[in-house]
Image (cartoon, rainbow, N blue to C red):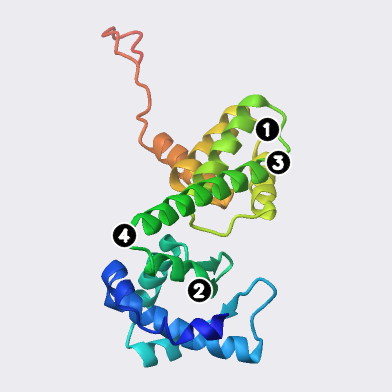
Amino acid sequence: MYLDLFDELRLNKRLIKLAGFEVAAYWAELQSILKQVVKKQTADEHGFFNLDRDYLEKETTLTLAKQLKCEEKLVSMGVLVKDPDNPNRLTIGVNSMVEIITDEDTKKLKKTSAVKKDEKAAKVAGIKQNMKRFILEQDSDLRAAYERWIEGMIDASNCRFTKAVVEVFEKTVTDYTPDKAKRLRIIEIATVNSYKDATWAISRLSNTRASSVATKLPEQKICTGTAENVTF
């Protein structure tokens, strides 16, 4: 099926109108790569295959930043899926693209984008719920704080979030202090600053406390004004 559609989809005018020339040209190059992948059977069981970024830039003149921008658009159209663990690994949906570029208006494209957005939101919600299962803390306040931290970290998307990240973070906080208030403060600092490593939050808390103590003036007593018994 892929090979039958190859010539038709290389550089489609309809796609240029919908997504722009760079996206259309990039899609055409992906088709060329897919043709070789199908022939050599180098895709995995889910249809994912690897991209050579340097080769792509040489063939299309698109820099890495522009390649990623094109992929962003193709993902939103629902014709490309990227491996969350490897940005250079993806799969493309030729049939989905056929439906979009043969439609008489943009309703199909808009519908596809909306569906993909809903699917992404559902996936993120599922990841959050799954990560919360690994919290060991039984105190309701601390547990709620850990859950807020997990949600914030996943929304920030600044690291690969795993079970180990949750376990190490909680153990670091627990081992640092038995004081509930301090633990809550550490988790709050980590949440606000999107720290996946609790030691960063602990260090920040310690520096804040040290700074506060250093700037506090010593208390002085008022002089009574008597010669025999002068006190301060």
The residue pinned by badge 3 equals 133
The residue pinned by badge 1 equals 178
Give the answer, above or below, for where 166 lies relative to 68.
above
Q: Is the residue marked by circle 4 packed among few (<14), some (14-19), or many (20+) residues within 10 Å?
A: few
The residue closer to the viewer here, 44 or 35, is 35
Q: Kindly identify the amino acid type of the residue bearing the numbered disc 2.
A: Val
Kindly indicate the quadrant of the structure image that contains residue 101.
bottom left
Image location of residue 21, percent across then percent down: 28, 77
Check if mark 2's residue and mark 4's residue have beta carbons within 8 Å: no
Which of pointers 2 and 1 lies earlier in the amino acid sequence? 2
Q: Nearer the viewer, mark 4 or mark 1?
A: 4
For the residues labelled 2 and 4, the Cα–Cα distance comes to 19 Å
For the residues labelled 4 and 1, the Cα–Cα distance comes to 62 Å
Check if mark 3's residue and mark 4's residue have beta carbons within 8 Å: no
Which of pointers 4 and 1 lies earlier in the amino acid sequence? 4
For the residues labelled 1 and 3, the Cα–Cα distance comes to 22 Å
- Could you say whether the residue bearing mark 4 is in a helix, strand or loop? loop
Q: Nearer the viewer, mark 3 or mark 2?
A: 2
The residue closer to the viewer here, 105 or 85, is 105
The residue pinned by badge 4 equals 105
Left or right: residue 223 compared with residue 99: left
Q: Nearer the viewer, mark 2 or mark 1?
A: 2
Q: Is the residue marked by circle 3 packed among few (<14), some (14-19), or many (20+) residues within 10 Å?
A: few
Q: Kindly identify the amino acid type of the residue bearing the numbered disc 4.
A: Asp
Residue 205 visible in the shown view? no
Q: At x 29% / y 77%, what residue is drawn?
A: 13
Image location of residue 231, percent across then percent down: 36, 13
